[in-house]
Image (spheres, rainbow, N blue to C red):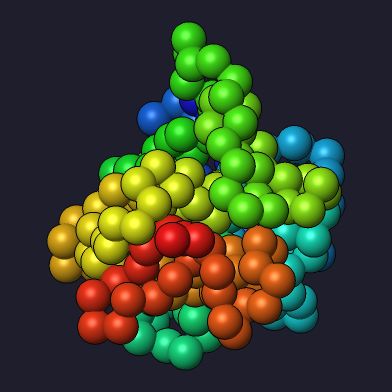
Amino acid sequence: MPRVVLVEDDPSVRDGVEMGLLRRGHDVLATATGEAGLEAVDTFRPDLLLLDLMLPGMDGVEVCRRVRARGQLPIIMLTARGDDVDIVVGLDAGADDYVVKPARTEVIEARIRAVLRGVEAPAGVRHLVEHHGGLAVDRAGHTVVRAGEPVALAPSELKLLLFLSAEPGRVFSRQDLLEEVWDHSYHSDVRLVDACVRRLRVKIEDRPDTPRYIQTQRGFGYRFGPL
């Protein structure tokens, strides 16, 4: 089972989530502050970070930025408000998904499985590098190279790029992408998609404001170019 670092300052929420995940076989290290969470990421070597958005001192957004600057550890943010602008800030900082509190353990575990799904290269698939202009995508090795330089992508960014680039030119709605990339139900938050697209464009586009690869089909969704 995945190793999880949990950062949550509310003792009742922290204890409840920790106990629920432990009962389901997860190895969990729970902390109460952003500073302790960063230290736990370094020492515990988790498979995933479950991070409260509102923390005393260093908040969850700053923790997310720092973790993402170090590497591509999957991050799920916890928030008490489902319509807060801070969610968008957290997603832009690099979170792969979020869960609104209070949430049942089975909901949190389902989000963990969805975020981690597809991180490992599928067995038996040959390494065949696809070239799209200056972008090289190794679908089996899950690596991306732009202009000869490796591109570090968070799990959600990589899965979005792999999904869109598998069918260049085809337009997918945001709801399509939520279902296929995030494994969310139809009535979910399209902010996940838009934030991930913004982050991905910064990493792979020469000019993110006039994207060549992740193109917007106004009124419909997104497609992969160049066409």
Answer with the quarter of the image where residue 112 lies. Answer: top left
As drawn, which residue projects farthest toward the top? 124
47 left or right of 70?
Answer: left
Q: Nearer the viewer, residue 106 or 194?
A: 194
Q: Is residue 67 visible?
A: no
Residue that extends furthest to the bottom in the rendered view of this protein: 85
Q: Is residue 204 visible?
A: yes
In what quadrant of the picture does the C terminus appear? bottom left
Quarter residue 215 falls in: bottom left
Quarter residue 75 falls in: bottom right
Q: Depth check: 148 or 28 in front?
A: 148
169 relative to 97 in the view: left or right: left
In this view, 140 is above or below 101: above
Judge whether 8 appears above or below 2 on screen.
below
Identify the residue shown where x is 49% and y is 81%: 88
Percent of width and height locating residue 146: 73, 52
The spot of residue 209 in percent (x, y) is 59, 84
Q: Residue furthest left?
A: 186
> In this rendering, is residue 3 above or below 31?
above
Residue 224 or residue 77, whichever sits in front: 224
- Point out residue 134 in the picture as x, y percentages from the top left corner: 69, 53
Measuring from the top left, give residue 95's x and y in whole percent: 56, 63
